[in-house]
Image (cartoon, rainbow, N blue to C red):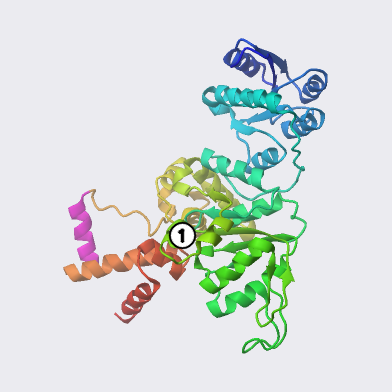
Amino acid sequence: MSKEPEHHLLLVDQDLDYLDWATKHLSAEGLKILRCDSADKASQVVKKAPIDVVICDIKLDPFDGVELLQLIRASSPETITILTAVSPTTSQIIEATQKGALDVLRKESLAFELRQVVEAALQTVDQRREIGPLSDQRPGLTGKTMIIGVSRPLQDVMKVVGRVAHSDAPVLVTGESGTGKELIARSIHAYSPRRKKEMLVINCGAIPENLLESELFGHEKGSFTGAIARRTGRFEDSHESTLFLDEIGDLPPSVQVKLLRVLQDGTFSRVGSNEVQKTDVRIVTATNKNLAQEVSEGRFREDLYYRLNVVEIELPPLRDRQEDIAILAEFFLDQIARRNGTARMRLTGEAIEHLQGHRWPGNVRELENTMARACALALNDILLPEDIPIGRGPVNVGGTLKDALALILELSEGTEQNAVDFVRGELIRHTLEQCNHDLKEASHLLGMSQANLKKLLSTAKNA
């Protein structure tokens, strides 16, 4: 940390032991550290003294750290604020970032991260002193998100959501199927100035190509067979709101051209009309495809790709969010109990370990379906590992490959060809279950075309 000019740092926390530790941990020549154990005292200090950086806990009295953040921003816009929490929620992370916090840190990681974050903040202070005062003021927003988790990869995503929500920049959400891309889009909308109007959603891969253009841009009466009246499209209906285009990688070339025009100047024409319509829409898109590869292979326009990918948010797969698996499982159990009006199921420690040991190729969607099956089949309200059917459940084959092959041959009536057909059929069945019988998603995971998958399914049914 630099010696000159002197920096002033304020620590705010109700835990006096933590204040002692943080003071020693951050102590450096040229840095003056002040301390407060309440939010109201801290707000008074910031009003009276020039504070460069504030590090405060979210859980404070008589009001919380997010409210203190707002007071600091109002009285001292130049002051950088870093929030800490034992386990910050996704809503807290988005709201704090949206309202101007530099970062939200988990207390368990402060020993590794705090000094580095503070040093970066103080470097920013020095740069501001060189180039002049800060003028950026972000509007405070309210709202909630239903994204569940405390893992660092998910928290990093939430910080990006908080930063981009206030703008109109197009956002591309990427990640594997079942990771929750639509929830990210809804969070962006919920924390944006457009939140007063409903966000509209359209799945570009679920609508036939000949109808998708009409669905997006509307049509005039008589413009095609069945067009018995004028109809507005999603771009008109989303005026001054957010439009979420899921599976954008499946957009046909003809529609890609019209979407590019909307992104360039906010104009389009209904199908069957030359009249130019104007719309003010914030576009959020999502895909589980590699769009850069789609561009290189000529299936997606390069200019459209760069228009959509102004900000990319990559959602981590559930296997990289180990801390979130138990939390999500408990959340789904709560939902199932409320929905069915039944007693809530409980997970044993062994059951949680069982869940955490699975790779979850279907991600959060697979976990939700798994918990629903477990609740439907359970004989009591305590869930043991054997009560949780991941796939068809674990099979004990004696721990050797030979035993496994022997079991497969036994189940497939003894011949090698039957064994191949059996394993292939079971793999397809398992994949379809994880994808909620979505043929497109299943064919993607199996690495085959939808036509081949349909052929194999047809063969299996006729066998």
Query: Residue 157's spot in the image, x, y percent?
Result: 57, 44
Q: Nearer the viewer, residue 59 or 109?
A: 109
The overriding secondary structure of the stretch rendered in magenta is helix
Query: From this viewpoint, which residue is outermost toward the top?
Result: 29
Query: Residue 156's spot in the image, x, y percent?
Result: 56, 40
Which corner quadrant of the image does residue 230 belong to?
bottom right
Q: Is residue 406 magenta?
A: yes
* Left or right of 150, for residue 391: left
Query: From this viewpoint, which residue is outermost toward the front?
Result: 131
Q: Measured along the vertical axis of the image, is residue 21 above or below residue 277?
A: above
Q: Secondary structure at mark 1?
A: loop
Magenta stretch bounds: 400-412
Query: Residue 361's spot in the image, x, y percent?
Result: 42, 55
Q: Nearer the viewer, residue 146 or 388?
A: 146
* Left or right of 15, for residue 61: right
Q: Residue at x 46, y 40 (%)?
A: 349
Q: Nearer the viewer, residue 334 or 190?
A: 190
* Left or right of 437, for residue 83: right
Q: Quadrant of the C terminus?
A: bottom left
Q: Nearer the viewer, residue 358 or 223?
A: 223
What amino acid is labelled 1 in the image?
Lys
Q: Is residue 89 magenta?
A: no
Q: Residue at x 72, y 51 (%)?
A: 192
Q: Residue at x 20, y 58 (%)?
A: 405
Disc 1 target residue: 289
- Numbered disc total: 1
Query: Residue 125's spot in the image, x, y percent?
Result: 67, 24
Q: Quadrant of the N terminus?
A: top right
* Left or right of 107, for residue 356: left
Q: Residue at x 76, y 27 (%)?
A: 61
